Amino acid sequence: MRLYRYVGPKGIAERVDPAALGVPIRSPQDVLRWVRETAQKADADGLVIATFVIDEAGLLRVADRRSEHVACAGGGLVQSAGEITFVLGRGKAGVAAVSNQSTGFCPEPESWPAVEATLRQAGFLAPDGFSPACVFRRCPKCGSISVVKDAVFECAVCDSPLPEAWNCDGEPT
């Protein structure tokens, strides 16, 4: 299983307090406790979206949606990262959706098995996969990271061709 290191802006990583990890989630009750203790607000459908990482040890960690993934990971390596949507109701918590949308770690869609295994271990029914499943590439010409859309491998900054193979493990910009 691939581990992803932070590849986003150095300035963000430099502000991370390694002791301020995301909250560990080992059960649906942990989600309910996190929502209550951090005053997360569910929308009209009972949904709460959070930043998540699967850390190096395979533990799900969450933080407020406006948090940086690298902060949720305490600056460490991750098996996957993105956003997770919890559905709350009748004193229960479930998982409605998960994306790998993290431009700080750029996890591949192939990181889904780590997410699925961790969710199942924590007592959640896992969705069928990432939604959306983001594809990231670093531009060899300008160094920026792009999200590949509609299978068009073209840099969003300089219009240069992007490689088809994952290449985001370069130096942070």
Image (cartoon, rainbow, N blue to C red):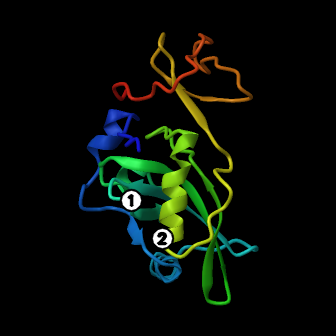
Q: Nearer the viewer, residue 2 or 99?
A: 2
Residue 165 spot, x, y in % from top left: 53, 23
Please determine whether, in this image, residue 85 is positioned above or below residue 88: above
Q: Is residue 65 visible?
A: no
Residue 109 spot, x, y in % from top left: 58, 41
Q: Are marks 1 and 2 in contact (CB under 8 Å)?
A: yes
In this view, the residue farthest toward the bottom is: 90
Of helix, strand and loop, which one carries label 2?
helix
Residue 93 spot, x, y in % from top left: 60, 79
Please determine whether, in this image, residue 64 is positioned above or below residue 162: below
Quick one: label 2, few (<14), some, or many (20+) residues within 10 Å?
some
Residue type, numbered disc 1: Gly
Please determine whether, in this image, residue 172 is positioned above or below residue 109: above
Question: Which quadrant is the C terminus positioned in?
Answer: top left
- The residue positioned 70% from the left and 75% from the top of the image is 46
Residue type, numbered disc 2: Gln
The residue pinned by badge 2 equals: 121
Of helix, strand and loop, which one carries label 1?
loop
Quick one: label 1, few (<14), some, or many (20+) residues within 10 Å?
some
Q: Nearer the viewer, residue 40 or 80?
A: 80
Q: Is residue 35 visible?
A: yes
Q: Nearer the viewer, residue 149 or 48?
A: 149
Residue 103 spot, x, y in % from top left: 50, 38
Distance (Cα) linking label 1 and label 2: 10 Å
- The residue positioned 57% from the left and 16% from the top of the image is 162
The residue pinned by badge 1 equals: 58
Question: Which quadrant is the N terminus positioned in?
Answer: top left
Horizontal side of residue 148 vs 143, given as left or right:
right
Please determine whether, in this image, residue 51 is positioned above or below residue 33: above
